[in-house]
Amino acid sequence: MEQKTEIFQGTLTLMTLKTLAALGPTHGYGVARRIEEISGDAFSLNYGTVYPALLKLEQEGFVASEWGVSDNNRKAKYYRLTAAGRKRVNKEAAAWTQTTAILARFLDMEEAK
Amino acid sequence: MRSVLSWFSKLAGIFSAHRAEQSFDEELQSHLELHIADNLRRGMTPEEARRVALLKLGGRDATKEAYRDQRRLPIVGTFLQDARFALRTMRRSPGLTAVAVLTLALGIGVNTAMFSIVYGVLLAPLPYHDPDALMSVYSSSPRRGYTAGPTSPPDFREMRDRNRTLASLSAYFNSAVNLSGDFQAERLSGLVVSTEFFDTLGVRPLLGRTFRTSEGVWGSHRAVVLSESFWRSRFAARPDILGAVLRLDGESWTVIGVMPASFYFRGEYQLWQPMAFRPGDVMDSHNNAFVRMVGRRKPGASRQQARTDLNAIMQDIAARHSENKGIGAGLMPLLEQVVGDVRRPLWVLLAAVGFVLLICCVNLSSLLLSRDAARKREFALRAALGASRGRLLRQFLTENLLLALLGGGASLGLAYLAVAKAHTLVVGVPRIQHVTVNTAVLLFALAASIGAGVLSGLLPCLWSSRPDLMGALREGRSASSNSRGGARLRGVLILTEVALAFVLTIAAGLMMQSFSRLLHVNSGFDPHNVLTFSVSLPDSYIEGVKASDITPPPRLTAFYDGLVARIARLPGVASVGVTSGLPLAGGNWIKFLSFDDRPAPASIDAVARVLFHSTEGDFFRAMGITLRKGRFFEAGDNVAAAPVVILNAAAARRYYPGEDPIGKLVFLAPPEQLLPPGELPAGFYIPRARIVGIVNDVHYEGLQDPPDPEVYAPLAQSDFFSTMSVAVRTLVPSTSLIPAIRAEVSDMDRELPIAKVATMDELAGSSVALPRLHTILLAIFGALALGLAAVGLYGVIAQSVAQRRHEVGVRIALGARPRAIVWGIVARAMTLVAAGLLIGCGLALALTRLMSTLLFEVAPVDAPTFVGSAGLLLATSALASYLPARRAASVDPIVALRCE
């Protein structure tokens, strides 16, 4: 159970970063929606979980935030990637792709047996 | 790097918590509004839109909590929260809090006090430059039975000049000088040091300078360095003291420096004098080993290399001087030499207080257990509401740590008090005056507090935080801690407590036993109503002495004869004697003993060695030493008469087994043929002395050492000593004679002070001061352990009995006899106590061996002590469990049943 959460935490961070990279400055609700949309039904995401993740990224200096006004004229806090954040997205995306590729090969091998 | 950044931002977050909270509230609000708006657009009703948004968020409060956890340093955040909660809990039960804090204050307090002494005495570096390189250097001769002995001045000089492993080597020895002048004559204790002494230690004077090499030469040696306290007390810290001239032993000495107050070496000295010998001084020979040495290792030179280096030099000396045969050199770290004797006792005492603290922790554990049992429902409720086990554990630990820190804080008061007392009460422990409650001690107290808090809290924590929700919630308040886990845990606590207390009472018992045996040793003299003091005659009394003289200078014998006669005439005096060494006062001379009627041994190493005392007047009667055979010395045993000696019983037993020594001829030197040619001055012969008496053995070196063979000779017929001690047996309280005696001495020589005035009772008392101190401390710790264990046991039994009140009530209602119930409770407790004793016995067997060097005539595994301690603990625990059991059994069944 805990292990699953841990994996989820890691991927959530990457997904958050990637979302911000793709959409530019976005509010927390937007990030949550986007992650859910992209993942389809694979995740049943509690929207609330993106906020601690965003806060962590902000504390580490990968994202920055400021209050702004949404498309439909509502006050919202917008998050955007910092330079360090952009660098991290690229690095982690590459690492992740590599990991999944390796893992996929392993799983194939198991099946082939 | 990133984690550091994040840590800082969290740290900052502590101080802006309120604003951040508000900001996140707004953010959540805007999130919900955005989501609701989206939902509405999809065609939901307003209520549905709102409900879905909240659901999707995963709960507003849960999100906030998760966000807070991320915002704060997790420990700090929950710690503050837990601490606030803990303080509230403590305020709700002030009695329990007070008992817990006091228990800890006591346990941590004795440990902190003991540690401050251990640190100040054993661990603190010596106050010299690079103290780790300083070594105590000594002569050793295993064949002659000593391993760390003094060295002769010429040996010291050769080692100093020829070694290649020491950066510096210096020598020192104690001296006593008479200060006279415009004021009342006073005896000062000084240290005579070779001129490089202060440089070896790497210390600087407060004023002036230390010795120059030229001041180590006889004639230009009359320079003196004062201690800060002497300069302050005697000269009111006069800044113009440098260059002042003091009359020391009738000669003029110039003050060249003052050492700072922080400087100490070995003891309290008023002054330091340079080491210089008059050309041809008999003391400055290979035969007279009396200087001690301190050296500084060269960087890179190991202890072993230095030992090899110095031994090579000593071997070379022995090749040239046969009296050095078999004498080598050794060295040990200076600190080790300074604290050698007290190291073991101090560690034993520290271990003992460690046990006391453990018992305190056990008591606290059981206290907390009963508290937590009462709160089990609260914890179950919190667990049901979603608190994780770790979170609950943290809450517990915080509460206990807070208790422990309060206890630790209170303990410092005890530690300060104990250290202040130690300064005045503890004698004979080196560096005790320099013990303070310093940073190291405070850190120790903090560590001990945290350790005690965690240790005492851990068991109850693990037990209470186990999320047996349903059980706890269902059981309600009273029955919960009666669960099997709780009973087992209490059993473990009793067991531990009894085992620990047993070990400590055994240790205390052994120490008390040993001390009582020490006090019952027959010292060989009668110390009551004996006043003693010492007199040091200046060089003017011995002028004109030649090395070939075999009897003391007439002026010296005349002085002591006169002194004895004058004091004997004082009213209230029974008898007076003079001796070269008092029992139990240290400083005894050793001489060779050879027998006129026996062939000489093969080598000088095989010649007998005995303690030697030169006496004058009625010494034996004054000291209360009884005669076994023959006669005491008489007035007729003077310079002109044939030499006589008296042996003690040990010497008679060893050298004349089955023979009557009276009338036999002996001499106090090696046989002539064993001495190198030219060693004896021309015209010198070794006088033969007749044994005229046998006296009882006297413990000169200490009560714990068996009496050595001793030989006494009349002062008029033997070597002289410039410092002699006088013993006066009185018919009136002996201290009342001090003024009259002072006046007599001053009347004989106005420049002569008397020193070391003490009753023989005091000397005997101070010779056992250290064992007495160890015994008292261990007895206190043992009693503390016993008391704490009894209180703890009482508490545990009372608690478990109180929880079984209902059951007891039912049983009484059904006709059980109260006595059977009491017996049942006591028997169950005693089973645990017995098991604890068994474990404690095992522990004690393993641990008391460590204190064997502290014990006198008592084996570390002493059956009576073990049995006695076990009996004491059994009786105490029987009482501690009987009292609550009786109360439980005397309860009115109606009341007991109703209270459910």
Image: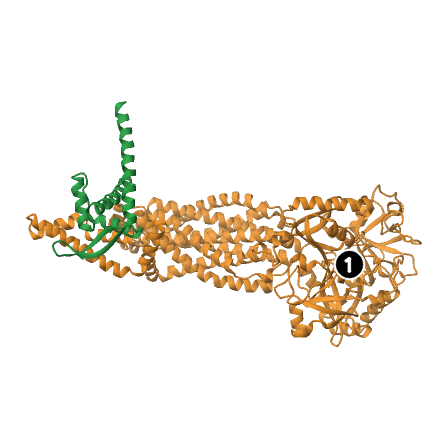
Chain colours: A green, B orange
Q: Confirm whether residue B804 shows in the render.
A: no
Task: Give the camera-side residue of B863 and B38.
Answer: B38
State the image coordinates of residue B152 (x, y, percent, origin top left).
77, 53
State the image coordinates of residue B775 (x, y, percent, origin top left).
59, 55
Residue A15 lies left or right of residue B594; in this view the side is left
* Amino acid carrying mark 1 in the image: Ile
Total numbered circles = 1
Q: Residue at x 55, y 56 (%)?
A: B119
State the image coordinates of residue B892 (x, y, percent, origin top left).
32, 55
Q: Residue at x 55, y 43 (%)?
A: B846
In which image quadrant can residue B614 be found?
Answer: bottom right
Residue A67 lies left or right of residue B685; in this view the side is left
The residue at the far bottom in this view is B182
* Chain that bears disc 1: B
Q: Confirm whether residue B106 shows in the render.
A: yes
The residue at the far top in this view is A113
Q: Is residue B413 above or below residue B400?
A: below
Q: Residues within 10 Å of mark 1 (few under 14, many from 20)?
A: some
State the image coordinates of residue B457 (x, y, percent, origin top left).
39, 51
Q: Residue at x 47, y 49 (%)?
A: B498
SS for callout 1: loop
Task: Give the camera-side residue of B667 and B239.
Answer: B239
Q: Is residue B743 above or below residue B658?
A: below
Q: Which residue is mark 1?
A: B625
In which image quadrant can residue B404 be found?
Answer: bottom left
